[in-house]
Image (cartoon, grey):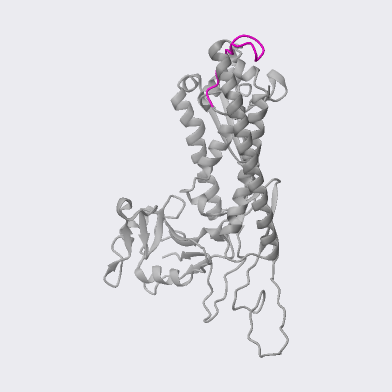
Amino acid sequence: MKDLKKLRASRAEKARLGKGKLDRLNALLDKADLTEAEQAELTKLEGEVDALEAEVKQLDSEIAAEERKASRARLFGATALGGPALATVVNDSDPARTAGFKNLAEFAVAVRNFQVAGIADPRITGAASGYQQNQGSSGEGVLVPTEWREQIWSLVFADNDLLGFCNPEPTQGNTVGIVKDETTPWGAAGVQAAWRSEGTQMIASKAALTPEILQLHELYAFVLATNEVLDDAPRLQNRITVQAARAIRWKLFEAVCFGDGNGKPLGFMASPALVTAPAEGGQSAGTIVTANILKMMARLFEMPGGNPIWLANRDTIPQLGTMTIGNNAAFLPVNQALTGSPFKNTLAGDPLLFNEHCQTVGTTGDIVLADLSGYALATKQGGGIDFAASIHLFFDQNLTAFRWIIRAGGQPYLSKPVQPAKGATAKSHFVALAAR
């Protein structure tokens, strides 16, 4: 008889590998133009993803068969699995990822009971694949099962969140190498196209690629939970998942916007790639006028497949709400039910997302036109978040500590604004309005 726990662990590992490869495959498929090396990588990844898909399907079939056997053994008291009917009932289809706990709150309470009262939950003491403890029972803490480490990672990088618009650069190490190509089809460098007369020799050109190393920096969230919170599972679940993810998400995108690059990502507002559109002559302080919006749009360098969005502080709403372009309103609160749009607001035709990262009205950064696909955000591959719990740090205060650590780095792909094919006004993926 096959070991069900090992089958599930193998399935989880295959799924983790497949997710990383699929993310990279999708990133290549979304690119308009692939280099020869990227095309070769694409072909290789398609084969690897297909192979992993077949392996996962085979493991699913084997797991289902073993689960049927286990279910019959519990139901009929069969001894074929090494004794009487199995007494341990798991609460998840993949206990190798959850150690059999229904939710993270239940796991946290079990850890507290085990370390404080010595109540040994068999799902902790007997589930080596789902539970690890550093340095024995008096060690620094326990590692949380994979399921909830990845759950928090998913909350941080939700598709509808600002971080989801950035261009991911996953890595297994603490650095990631990216290759920049800042050339344009109309520039003198990089791949060129040329007309030729019949019989004349072609002149070769090559891509002008600039390698860049992104350093990953450590970002943490550290939460203390009292016995009262630990005894209230719904509150604890919210505290150690939603609120932690919200704090990490806020801090990380704040660095994407304004980070100085020292111990944190380099934000686009602090980058030499930022373009700042000047205010109008005689423009009143703390105002935004139609000409500002139109001139910002004129300065955006939009790539094929790009996704420009407006980012603005809610302080700007009184200004935007009265703005018109010709006889039409520039700012439109969209009825999602009627349009099917995932965005509630648009400005001059592009999505508008209000947030608390942007500066107050009248300050540079109160409204920004950005194509975040022009920002490289390096993170640990495969949901790389370290999540641990400890009772020992604050033992004398009867508190349990929860700690999350993620590593992330980032910077705009452009090192400076791009010169246009015609004209002299430089453009960028990131355009802000100057202070008024």
The quadrant in which residue 433 appears is bottom left
Q: Residue furthest left?
A: 327
The quadrant in which residue 112 appears is top right
Residue range corresponding to the magenta coloring:
78-92
Residue 358: where, in percent of width, then height? 45, 54
Residue 80 visible in the shown view: yes
The residue at 49%/40% (across/down) is 246
Image quadrant holding the C terminus, namely bottom left
Residue 165: where, in percent of width, then height? 51, 54
What type of secondary structure mainly makes up the magenta span? loop
The residue at 54%/77% (across/down) is 420
Total numbered badges shown on the rendered structure: 0
The residue at 62%/43% (across/down) is 53
Q: In this view of the protein, which residue sits in the foreground, 209 or 415? A: 209
Q: In this view of the protein, which residue sits in the foreground, 58 or 218? A: 58
Residue 388 visible in the shown view: no
Residue 19: where, in percent of width, then height? 61, 44
Q: In this view of the protein, which residue sits in the foreground, 57 or 18? A: 57
Residue 153: where, in percent of width, then height? 56, 40
Q: Is residue 231 left or right of residue 263?
A: left
Image quadrant holding the N terminus, namely top right
Relative vertical location of residue 9 with respect to residue 22 in this rendering, above or below: above
**Residue 87 among those drawn in magenta:** yes
Relative vertical location of residue 288 with respect to residue 135 in this rendering, above or below: below
